[in-house]
Image (spheres, grey):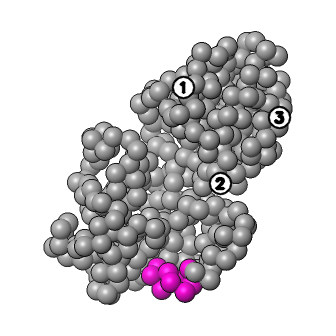
């Protein structure tokens, strides 16, 4: 690679944690990457206020994009979220034809279903030659990308993570309010229906416990105006961090979560974790010391997990607190910067 290395990053639905990762990269490698994004669910005006670099917003279906729209020089390294965005794929083609390297950011967790079992045929036929390496969130995604056919040495962990400057440890769990917290969209995929059912059954048994839910979506009414339940449509990151530090357990009952940045945010805050089997981050941030895992889609199993958590004593809570903090330390913006730096070294 040339000494005057140029880097570009294209992120689908560019999220705040993506900006934190890019900011860490700027500090680590003293580079100013070109940042391209498709519009996120969050207001992209709000996203731009968090950015320290210009963001070039594009239409995901625009196949006429050229690098000349953003920069005078086609970048040497192009880090791109997957291969499902046509506009990003066109930019990647131009990088490859110019002799540069394209690196995939892949968050799909390993599920082992039929679709994934046949995925290597499609990937190796169409996409394998597109990418020199991949950056993934953690172990489950690593296994999936390895199964697709990338060599182990070309797969780097560190894609996702919460902002360690905002999400900091709170007091010991036994000193916190008896509170569960959910953060995410109020949609079927997040297991909101199971959460509402499980909590309605568990709450009368634990009248001194509360559920605080942050998010919005069509299933919001399942949680609103229910006993011992508090619903918030939105919280700024610093407000969310305060809520984590004042809660004992995060509950994430997702039917599907490739990783789950909220799991990392809660773990950095010292929370215990109640997560479904379909949350990818459980392989990296949850174990028998800090977490309770239940079968996704099973409201009765979630109710049981909530009951077990509510009955834990001070010793168990102390162990959970320290284990969450220890596991969370491995992930975050600096891990993304580490991964990119390693990728760049491997290309030289």
Magenta segment includes 294: no
Q: Which residues are magenta?
A: 123-131
Relative depth, front residue between 123 and 245 = 123
Q: Which mark is residue 243?
A: 1
Q: Image height check: is 323 above or below 181?
A: below
Quadrant location of the N terminus in the rendered image: bottom left
- Marks 2/1: CA–CA distance: 23 Å
Q: Main secondary structure of the magenta part?
A: helix
Circle 3 residue? 300
Circle 2 residue? 280
Task: Give the crowd class for mark 1: few <14, some 14-19, many >=20 residues within 10 Å.
Answer: many
Q: Image height check: is 78 above or below 258?
A: below
Residue at image location 54% in from the left, 25% down from the top: 243
Sequence order check: which comes first, mark 2 or mark 3?
2
Relative depth, front residue between 236 and 7 = 236
SS for dot 1: helix
Relative depth, front residue between 261 and 226 = 226
Task: Give the crowd class for mark 2: few <14, some 14-19, many >=20 residues within 10 Å.
Answer: many
- Pair 2/3: label in front: 3
Does the rendering let one see residue 135? yes
- Marks 2/3: CA–CA distance: 21 Å
């Amino acid at each position: 690679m040339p000494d005057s290395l140029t880097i570009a990053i294209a992120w689908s639905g560019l999220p705040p944690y993506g900006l934190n990762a890019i900011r860490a990269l700027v500090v680590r490698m003293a580079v100013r990457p070109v940042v391209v994004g498709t519009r996120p669910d969050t207001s992209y005006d709000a996203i731009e206020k968090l950015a320290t670099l210009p963001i070039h917003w594009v239409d995901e279906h625009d196949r006429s994009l050229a690098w000349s729209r953003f920069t005078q020089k086609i970048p040497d390294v192009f880090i791109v979220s997957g291969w499902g965005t046509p506009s990003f794929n066109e930019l990647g083609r131009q990088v490859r034809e110019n002799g540069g390297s394209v690196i995939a950011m892949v968050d799909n967790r390993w599920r082992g279903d039929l679709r994934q079992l046949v995925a290597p045929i499609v990937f190796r036929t169409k996409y394998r030659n597109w990418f020199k390496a991949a950056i993934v969130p953690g172990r489950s995604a690593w296994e999936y990308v390895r199964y697709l056919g990338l060599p182990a040495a070309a797969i780097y962990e560190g894609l996702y993570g919460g902002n360690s400057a905002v999400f900091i440890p709170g007091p010991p769990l036994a000193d916190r309010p008896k509170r569960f917290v959910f953060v995410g969209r109020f949609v079927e995929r997040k297991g909101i229906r199971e959460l509402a059912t499980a909590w309605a059954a568990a709450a009368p048994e634990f009248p001194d416990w509360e559920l605080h839910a942050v998010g919005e979506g069509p299933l919001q009414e399942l949680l609103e105006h229910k006993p011992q339940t508090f619903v918030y449509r939105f919280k700024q990151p610093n407000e969310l961090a305060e809520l984590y530090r004042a809660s004992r357990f995060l509950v994430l009952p997702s039917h599907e979560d490739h990783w789950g940045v909220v799991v990392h945010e809660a773990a950095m805050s010292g929370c215990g974790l109640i997560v479904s089997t379909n949350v990818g981050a459980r392989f990296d941030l949850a174990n028998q010391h800090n977490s309770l895992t239940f079968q996704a889609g099973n409201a009765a199993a979630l109710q049981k997990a909530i009951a077990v958590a509510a009955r834990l004593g001070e010793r168990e809570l102390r162990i959970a607190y320290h284990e969450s903090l220890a596991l969370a330390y491995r992930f975050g913006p600096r891990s993304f910067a580490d991964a990119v730096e390693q990728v760049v070294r491997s290309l030289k």
